[in-house]
Amino acid sequence: MPLRDYIEKAKEVLDKNWMGEYTVPSVHLYPHQWNWDSGFIAIGYSRYNMERAVREILHLFEAQWKNGMLPQIVFNKNALGRYFPEPDFWRTDLSPYAPDNILTSGITMPPIHGYAVLKMYENAREKDRLIPFLKFIYPKLIKLHEYLYLERNPDDNGLIYIRHPWESGMDNSPMWDPVLERIDIDKVDIPEFERKDNKIIDPEQRPKDIDYKRYIYLVDIFRKNRYDEKRIFEECPFIVIDPLFNSILCASNEALVQIADIIKEDYKKPEEWFLMTARAVRDNLFSSEKKIFFAYDYVQKELIEVETAAGFMPLFGGIASTQQALKIYEHLDSLSFCRLGEKNCFAIPNYDKRKKDFSPHNYWRGPVWININWMLYQGLLRYKFKQKAEHLEITIMELPMRFGFYEYFDSFTGKGYGTKDFSWTAALFIDLAY
Ligand code: 9WN
């Protein structure tokens, strides 16, 4: 089948998931609008339908909290009852900052939006027509980053924390195991709940019940504290500095500097934020011995020495020094993460495939994800690892072409897992195919 037919198929996936104002990640499994998904989706749209790209971002930012937080989920009032947890569980109405008349969850996600908006501008054929949008959205992007630097930056050094695994976007990554295992589910009160995800998708491919108990325990802490960041910070056992989140933030800070330049705004703030976070990640999260960046457990005050694809993301954020980049490249292009020329593996799996608890089919515990590989592809290009970047680009396109627009893929066989017709797989495929 020629490439243009696959592009048409990808567009059909997005058409099916387009709700008129925004795009759901997948109609059955995720029937609402998701934060970082919309960033990737807008990048795909900007290749062929700028109006949709703009509407996608505008709809998400309509739900921005009064304190600047951009919520993980904006709920579709007509689709309630199909996902868990939904507004009746989150109770974000208890927060003085939640938006009026819009239902959202009470956590955020990796802030890819500054980066996505700049990509939209770069892809625009008539750049002038996008200027009013840039002018409208820029202060909102600044407000989002301001929230992170004011409320999630406890040491004032630019290392931003997340307070729930869902905020990382890599929910059951093995990185979070050591932190979550400290929540003793037999000793704490966990509210009653019923999962929906594992009735739709094979439970073997989803987080375990024990993971969900801990996720829900954390949400309960948030709502009991009425989403007050200071009080949550005191009580929450999951306070973690994630290299993925901080790298994406850096990429967006850098993009904000460029957007400011285009619309003739002052770019001092995002420039300072970029330098501060980049330096802090370089100085605090890098392991020269293990050749990777690690997450940091703020409660235990120690690095979480678990090797996942998130540890290579400082390439995407422009954070890694040349020396650090050379070191992590050795690790990234090794038998642990699928070496160039290695047979029987595809792209970069989300976890070191030589570890005993590596799973080729379970969610964030091993499979290949298109958005992560797409960002690593950008990072490899940036640091001039050209051969690997080109190989990755071909593989990211090959996976959905051979196996379908799935949510994630088996790192050994390429088989698709999770939900089919997944929006960011289609959108980022379109981006590469254009
Ligand atoms: C919780 C929507 C989201 C992605 C996340 C992915 C998954 C949700 C879930 O789906 O998480 O946010 O219910 O499992 O982990 O990265 O944004 O596609």
Image (cartoon, rainbow, N blue to C red):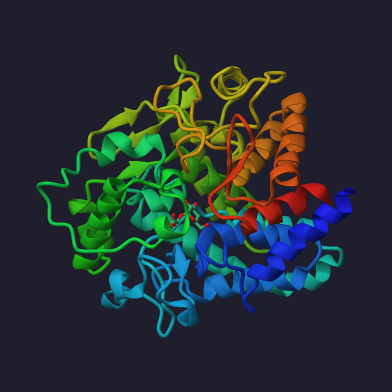
Residue 206 is left or right of residue 130, and the answer is left
Residue at 74%, 65% in the rendered image:
12
The relative height of residue 383 versus residue 157 in the rendered view (above or below) is above
How many numbered dots are placed on residues in this image? 0
Residue 380 is left or right of residue 91, and the answer is right
Residue at the extreme bottom of the image, as rendered: 101
The relative height of residue 296 versus residue 234 in the rendered view (above or below) is above
Q: Which of 288 and 154 is in front in this view?
A: 288
The relative height of residue 378 versus residue 97 in the rendered view (above or below) is above
- The answer to which image quadrant residue 393 occupies is top right
Residue at 37%, 70% in the rendered image:
86
Residue at the extreme left of the image, as rendered: 187
Q: Where is residue 85 in the image (x, y as percent from the top left)?
A: 35, 66
Q: Position of residue 296 (x, y in %)?
A: 35, 35
Q: Nearer the viewer, residue 30 or 145?
A: 30
Q: Position of residue 168 (x, y in %)?
A: 43, 48
Q: Position of residue 325 (x, y in %)?
A: 60, 24
Residue 341 is left or right of residue 314, and the answer is right
Report if residue 90 is visible in the image.
Answer: yes
Report if residue 260 is visible in the image.
Answer: no
Residue 57 is left or right of residue 120, and the answer is left
Q: Nearer the viewer, residue 180 or 81?
A: 81
Residue at 30%, 75% in the rendered image:
88
- The answer to which image quadrant residue 314 occupies is top right
